[in-house]
Image (cartoon, helix red, strand yellow):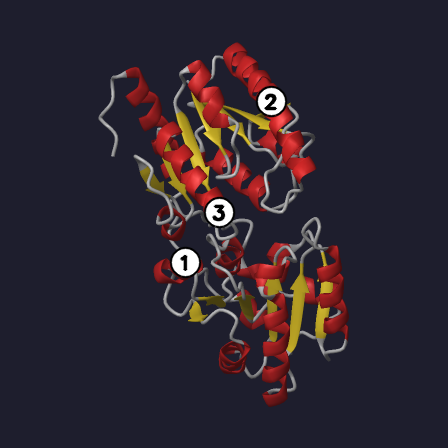
């Protein structure tokens, strides 16, 4: 039995928690005993429990280049305390492998070094905000990771770790599927027959929702029947930015600005086109995979890992446009959206998501555990 302890310094109903849940679900329960360390209660606690994982709460902090001096001082003071508590937990559990579920999680490497346990570092970020941070994390992953899992080749290209595995995540086809079409539009009051483009994600300055609004206005000037729906809540600290976007959206006809939603599978199934308009390199773009699994074609910006999704997806999955180019995005919207829509047509679409690689998580953990015991092959 491989006893895995995964460390994540945030607990949120968002990308990293959902990604961790998908990974846990992919690991054979008869072979893996999964334990997760989070800074507090997880909004996905019930789902983790159903997946067979045990949750442990230990105070940790997220790092950010936007931290004040006081926040960095608090992080530095709390770091050794958290490392000590996690090490005690790992020793008590008899952990086989440590797993850090973020490039910005700086606790796991120290715990692994203290206990002399293998450490797998999961890189889910492209670091563009700080060259110093990237250099430091390149050093840490090179020196203190037995293996680094990257969500995309774009993430892997920024690192120079000793061993790197690119595992692009996919989603459960039973959860994201086209036959859910018709439900979301009914609830949201959007006509069934209008061409509908949509976007979903946390409202942050680099996500390009302002570019999408400008592109939609341009496209709607050519095709007045188009509608747009945007779902997602603000990133902490960006509430004022999110409010300004909502005010701008309220002045554009047929824009449905809906905030946080829990019915994303139904949303994707009811779209005619999904857009990921990021203006900085997107580490991967799982929302685009979710849309593709629902049969919905996508438009992504040609930066970071999102183009890799289309390279591996089924034919006709979508196209790329240059980042921060509302004119090119408007042209793609006007060209790719159908003349009319219907729930029956949307429900008949086939999944376009790339082939699954989720089984490879178990392979990596097995390989690292064997290699540290000395009875497996050498590293990659």
Please name the residue that numbered disc 3 is placed on: 125
**For the residues carrying marks 1 and 2, which lies nearer the camera in this image?**
2
Q: Of helix, strand and loop, which one carries label 1? A: helix
Spot occupied by residue 233 in the image (x, y as percentages of width and height):
70, 55
Using a 10 Å C-alpha cutoff, classify the residue at mark 3 as few (fewer than 14 neighbours), some (14 to 19) or many (20 or more).
Answer: many
Q: Nearer the viewer, residue 113 or 313?
A: 113
Above or below, 306 against 11 in this view is below
Using a 10 Å C-alpha cutoff, classify the residue at mark 1 as few (fewer than 14 neighbours), some (14 to 19) or many (20 or more).
Answer: many
| Residue at 54 percent of width and 10 percent of height | 92
Question: What is the C-alpha distance between the residues marked 1 and 3?
Answer: 16 Å
Residue 257 sits in which quadrant? Answer: bottom right
Please name the residue that numbered disc 1 is placed on: 309
First reached walking from the N terminus: tag 1 or tag 3 = 3
Quadrant of the snapshot with the N terminus: top left
**For the residues carrying marks 1 and 3, which lies nearer the camera in this image?**
3
Q: Is residue 128 left or right of residue 62?
A: left
Q: Of helix, strand and loop, which one carries label 3? A: loop
Q: Nearer the viewer, residue 293 or 307?
A: 307
In this view, the residue farthest toward the left is: 377
Spot occupied by residue 216 in the image (x, y as percentages of width and height):
61, 78
| Residue at 76 percent of width and 62 percent of height | 243
Q: Nearer the viewer, residue 91 or 108?
A: 108
Question: What is the C-alpha distance between the residues marked 1 and 2?
Answer: 37 Å
Please name the residue that numbered disc 2 is placed on: 82
Above or below, 75 against 202 in this view is above
First reached walking from the N terminus: tag 3 or tag 2 = 2
First reached walking from the N terminus: tag 1 or tag 2 = 2
Instruction: Say whether marks 1 and 2 touch (CB < 8 Å).
Output: no
């Amino acid at each position: 039995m491989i006893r895995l302890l995964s460390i994540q310094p945030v607990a949120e109903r968002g990308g990293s928690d959902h990604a961790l849940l998908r990974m846990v679900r992919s690991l054979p329960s008869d072979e893996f005993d999964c334990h997760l360390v989070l800074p507090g209660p997880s909004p996905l606690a019930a789902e983790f429990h159903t997946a067979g994982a045990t949750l442990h709460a230990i105070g940790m902090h997220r790092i950010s280049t936007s931290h004040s001096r006081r926040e960095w001082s608090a992080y530095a003071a709390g770091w050794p305390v958290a490392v000590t508590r996690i090490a005690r937990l790992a020793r008590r559990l008899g952990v086989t492998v440590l797993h850090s579920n973020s490039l910005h999680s700086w606790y796991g490497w120290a715990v692994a070094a203290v206990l002399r346990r293998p450490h797998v570092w999961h890189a889910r970020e492209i670091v563009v905000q700080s060259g110093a941070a990237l250099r430091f994390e390149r050093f840490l992953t090179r020196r203190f990771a037995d293996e680094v899992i990257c969500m995309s080749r774009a993430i892997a290209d920024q690192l120079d770790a000793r061993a790197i595995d690119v595992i692009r995540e996919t989603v459960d086809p039973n959860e994201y599927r086209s036959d859910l079409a018709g439900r979301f539009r009914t609830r949201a009051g959007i006509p069934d027959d209008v061409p509908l483009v949509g976007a979903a994600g946390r409202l942050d300055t680099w996500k390009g929702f302002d570019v999408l609004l400008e592109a939609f206005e341009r496209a709607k000037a050519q095709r007045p029947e188009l509608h747009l729906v945007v779902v997602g809540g603000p990133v902490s600290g960006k509430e004022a930015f999110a409010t300004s976007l909502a005010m701008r959206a309220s002045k554009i006809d047929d824009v449905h600005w809906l905030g946080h939603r829990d019915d994303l599978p139904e949303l994707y199934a009811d779209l005619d086109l999904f857009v990921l308009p990021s203006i900085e390199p997107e580490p991967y773009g799982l929302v685009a995979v979710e849309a593709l699994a629902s049969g919905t074609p996508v438009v992504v910006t040609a930066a970071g890992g999102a183009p890799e999704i289309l390279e591996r997806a089924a034919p006709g999955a979508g196209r790329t446009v240059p980042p921060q180019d509302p004119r090119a995005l408007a042209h793609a919207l006007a060209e790719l959206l159908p003349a009319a829509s219907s729930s029956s047509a949307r429900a008949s679409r086939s999944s376009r998501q790339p082939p699954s690689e989720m089984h490879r998580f178990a392979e990596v953990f097995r390989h690292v555990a064997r290699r540290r015991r000395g009875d497996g092959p050498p590293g990659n």
